[in-house]
Image (spheres, grey):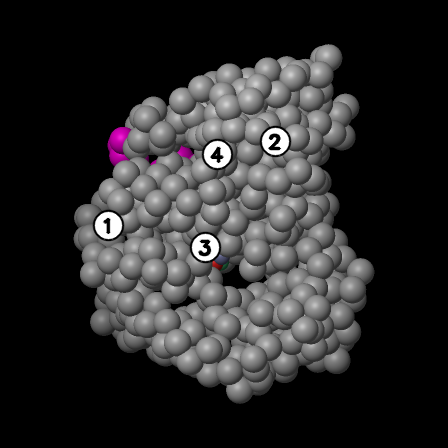
């Protein structure tokens, strides 16, 4: 752990949170926000303070990416960004906290997984937390969930309804796990795809000789997600438990969430920046490497689904944006050259989420700046019980900030990105909205194109359980 950073005085910026916009100076000290100036009143700089000129810039809460997979062992490979390189890329794009996933081996210990991921994440350069995956059910799983909530700052548990034979859980596991998590004041999330249907369609496509990447979306049509989302929502509703649906990619699932919310059920939806901007046409390219680079689950969809996702974010029926950053190089994706079901699933995105959402969200009028902060930071902080430590600008909040230039432009490319992967799904996209400086834990970690990080600067963020009276799921 490096020495504490000197105080930083941020002058002349516009503070933009999910609630307000304010022209004020900001003083950071000892890793937290120490003072917020009165509008138009210059804050005095203490001795030893560094000063950052934020004239013309927005000062926003650092982005929170609630869905990443650094160095994940998956489908016979390990995702290529580790916790150092992946969090460096996060900072370069204005993200200052990630929530990754500790995933037990099949039938393995959740606690062992949490310890294994904790060791891997120790080299992070920004703050991090873990959702812990439940991949089977037993009394030991229940006991370990209890220990993780009470002693390890875990308040969220993940369930994969897809990936039959690997991570997939059945309804029985979901019922047991969601019910137990509710008693602990913990929130459950689901990867909502019907894994049995996917396996069935995969077999049928391969039997017809469809082995290329085009088979991937054909084996996971929108109905596969819509059915699973409805089923998970029904199970949570039976138990009176809240639910968080990760990487909502279809109008089908978005509608299921909106309908449940309209009936008073506490369901949250997450949208990947990639699904908002990239469509299923990428699988039509004859070039295996290009199409395989886009193999992720859920797959990219027809453009009509993108409109439903944007509408969900603007209307508040979908709540967070993430990246599911889980990248594999071309040599790794080639594992599935003769069989699309063997292509490691996943794409990168952690470095570009904020810029693509500013460019395609705020500059098009789909999102206001306040809504941008809500969906890139504040809502994840609230849903996973990190607010107001994270996701806002308040005295005592972590000094996790991004100095955002709303007018600067950059062209996205694998040739220049910091993600340790040889492909960028946004390759060549010119975006307006750039992180000029990123401050993490009070340290100037990214400034004018240069990273200033030391492995281990990032800290584990324990997230307390919800008290029963205020638990978001209780009617
Ligand atoms: O399903 C996930 O979220 C992980 C395994 C990343 N891969 C993916 O294709 N989304
Ligand atoms: Zn998933
Ligand atoms: Zn994921």
Spatial distance from mark 4 to mark 3, Cα to Cα? Answer: 24 Å
Kindly report which numbered mark, 4 or 3, lies closer to the viewer in this rendering. Answer: 4
* Secondary element at tag 2: strand
Q: Residue 22 carries which label?
A: 4
Spatial distance from mark 4 to mark 1, Cα to Cα? Answer: 42 Å
Main SS, magenta region, reads loop
- Assess whether residue 201 is covered by the magenta stretch: no
From the top left corner, tell me how far across and down residue 359 is, in percent.
Answer: 30, 38
Relative to 399, is 193 on the left or the right?
left
- Assess whether residue 426 is covered by the magenta stretch: yes
Q: Quadrant of the N terminus?
A: top right
Kindly report which numbered mark, 3 or 1, lies closer to the viewer in this rendering. Answer: 3
Q: Are marks 2 and 4 in contact (CB under 8 Å)?
A: yes
Q: Do the residues labelled 2 and 3 touch (CB within 8 Å)?
A: no
Spatial distance from mark 1 to mark 2, Cα to Cα? Answer: 47 Å
From the top left corner, tell me how far across and down residue 315 is, in percent.
Answer: 34, 60
Give the residue at mark 1.
282
From the top left corner, tell me how far across and down residue 33 is, in percent.
Answer: 65, 33
Between 439 and 167, the one lying in front of the other is: 439
Question: How many numbered marks appear?
Answer: 4
Relative to 308, is 387 on the left or the right?
right
Give the residue at mark 2.
36
Q: Tell me where the magenta segment starts and ends, as one range.
A: 421-430
- Going 35% across and 39% down the picture, which residue do you hit? 358
* Secondary element at tag 1: helix
Q: Do the residues labelled 3 and 1 touch (CB within 8 Å)?
A: no
- Going 28% across and 49% down the picture, which residue do you hit? 366
- Going 31% across and 65% down the picture, which residue do you hit? 250
């Amino acid at each position: 752990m490096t020495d504490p950073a000197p105080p930083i005085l941020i002058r002349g910026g516009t503070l933009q949170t999910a609630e307000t916009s304010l022209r004020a100076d900001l003083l950071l000290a000892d890793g937290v926000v120490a003072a917020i100036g009165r509008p138009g009143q210059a804050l005095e700089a203490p001795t030893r303070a560094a000063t950052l000129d934020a004239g013309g810039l927005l000062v926003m809460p650092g982005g929170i990416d609630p869905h990443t997979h650094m160095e994940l062992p998956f489908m016979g490979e390990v995702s290529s960004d580790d916790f150092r390189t992946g969090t460096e890329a996060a900072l370069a794009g204005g993200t200052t906290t990630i929530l990754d996933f500790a995933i037990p081996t099949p039938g393995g210990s959740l606690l062992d997984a949490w310890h294994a991921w904790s060791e891997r994440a120790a080299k992070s350069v920004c703050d991090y937390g873990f959702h812990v995956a439940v991949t089977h059910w037993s009394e030991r799983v229940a006991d370990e969930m209890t220990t993780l909530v009470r002693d390890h700052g875990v308040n969220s548990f993940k369930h994969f309804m897809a990936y039959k034979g690997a991570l997939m859980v059945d309804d029985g596991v979901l019922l047991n796990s969601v019910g137990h998590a509710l008693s602990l004041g913990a929130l459950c999330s689901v990867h909502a795809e019907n894994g049995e249907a996917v396996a069935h369609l995969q077999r049928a496509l391969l039997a017809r000789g469809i082995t290329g990447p085009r088979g991937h979306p054909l084996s996971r049509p929108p109905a596969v997600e819509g059915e699973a989302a409805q089923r998970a929502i029904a199970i949570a509703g039976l138990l009176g438990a809240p639910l968080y649906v990760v990487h909502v990619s279809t109008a089908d699932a978005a509608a299921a969430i909106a309908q449940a919310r309209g009936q008073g059920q506490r369901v949250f939806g997450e949208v990947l920046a990639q699904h908002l901007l990239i469509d299923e046409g990428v699988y039509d390219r004859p070039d295996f490497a290009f199409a395989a680079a886009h193999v992720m689950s859920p797959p990219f969809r027809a453009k009509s689904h993108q409109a439903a996702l944007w509408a969900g974010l603007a209307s508040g029926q979908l709540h967070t944006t993430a990246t599911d950053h889980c990248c594999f190089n071309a040599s790794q994706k080639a594992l599935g050259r003769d069989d699309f079901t063997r292509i490691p699933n996943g794409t990168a995105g952690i470095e570009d989420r904020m810029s693509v959402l500013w460019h395609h969200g705020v500059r098009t009028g789909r999102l206001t700046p306040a809504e941008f902060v809500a969906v890139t930071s504040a809502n994840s902080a609230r849903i996973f019980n990190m607010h107001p430590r994270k996701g806002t600008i308040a005295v005592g909040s972590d000094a996790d900030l991004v100095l955002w230039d709303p007018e600067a432009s950059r062209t996205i490319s694998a040739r220049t990105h910091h993600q340790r992967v040889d492909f960028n799904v946004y390759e060549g996209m010119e975006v307006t909205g750039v992180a000029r400086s990123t401050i993490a834990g009070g340290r100037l970690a990214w400034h004018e194109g240069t990273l200033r990080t030391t492995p281990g600067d990032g800290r584990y963020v324990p997230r307390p359980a919800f008290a029963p009276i205020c638990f978001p799921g209780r009617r």
